[in-house]
Amino acid sequence: MSEFDIWVYRASTGYERGIDLIGYKVEATDGSIGKISRHSEEVGASYLVVDTGMWIFGKHVLLPAGTIKVIDAAEETVYVDRTKDQIKDAPEFDEAKHAGEPTYLEQFARYYNMPHM
């Protein structure tokens, strides 16, 4: 039995290392939530930061790579396996804390119900 890692792109997503996802639309299970403003390919800590724009007043949310179901490069859309409410209620992404606190990603792992390795 293999253990699921929330910080790793699933093989089934179609993700290819080096692809630039910035600007791609993000679709939750129940509709559009915004566009990708940054993404990380860091081994064991891959994620997207989504700018939700006017939907929740410009909030930036972090989505671990493991929440991605599929990436449609032709449509420039990323589909995630969370609802709009789950994403709206996630902790807000804070660039300063991310850069300065080594345990910063743990709050996202807890929120998305997966232990951070």
Image: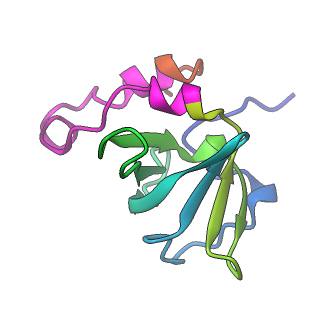
What number of labels is visible? 0
Q: Which residue is found at the position 75% from the left and 67% from the top? A: 14
The relative height of residue 5 versus residue 37 in the rendered view (above or below) is: above
The relative height of residue 24 versus residue 36 in the rendered view (above or below) is: below
Quadrant location of the N terminus in the rendered image:
top right
Q: Which residue is found at the position 65% from the left and 32% from the top? A: 83
Q: Seen in the image, is 18 located left or right of residue 30? A: left
Q: Which residue is found at the position 44% from the left and 60% from the top? A: 36
Q: Seen in the image, is 52 located left or right of residue 2? A: left
Q: Seen in the image, is 86 located left or right of residue 3? A: left
**Picture quadrant where residue 91 is located:** top left
Check if residue 69 falls in the magenta segment.
no
Q: Which residues are magenta?
A: 85-109
Expressed as whole percent of the image width and height from the top left, the position of residue 71 reads 69, 65
Front one among 117 and 104: 104
Q: Residue furthest bottom?
A: 74
The relative height of residue 116 versus residue 7 in the rendered view (above or below) is: above
Q: Residue furthest right?
A: 1
What colour scheme does the image use? rainbow
Expressed as whole percent of the image width and height from the top left, the position of residue 30 reads 71, 40
The relative height of residue 79 versus residue 75 in the rendered view (above or below) is: above
Expressed as whole percent of the image width and height from the top left, the position of residue 56 reads 38, 38
Check if residue 89 falls in the magenta segment.
yes
Expressed as whole percent of the image width and height from the top left, the position of residue 47 reads 47, 49
Q: Which residue is found at the position 69% from the left and 54% from the top? A: 79
Q: Residue furthest front?
A: 54
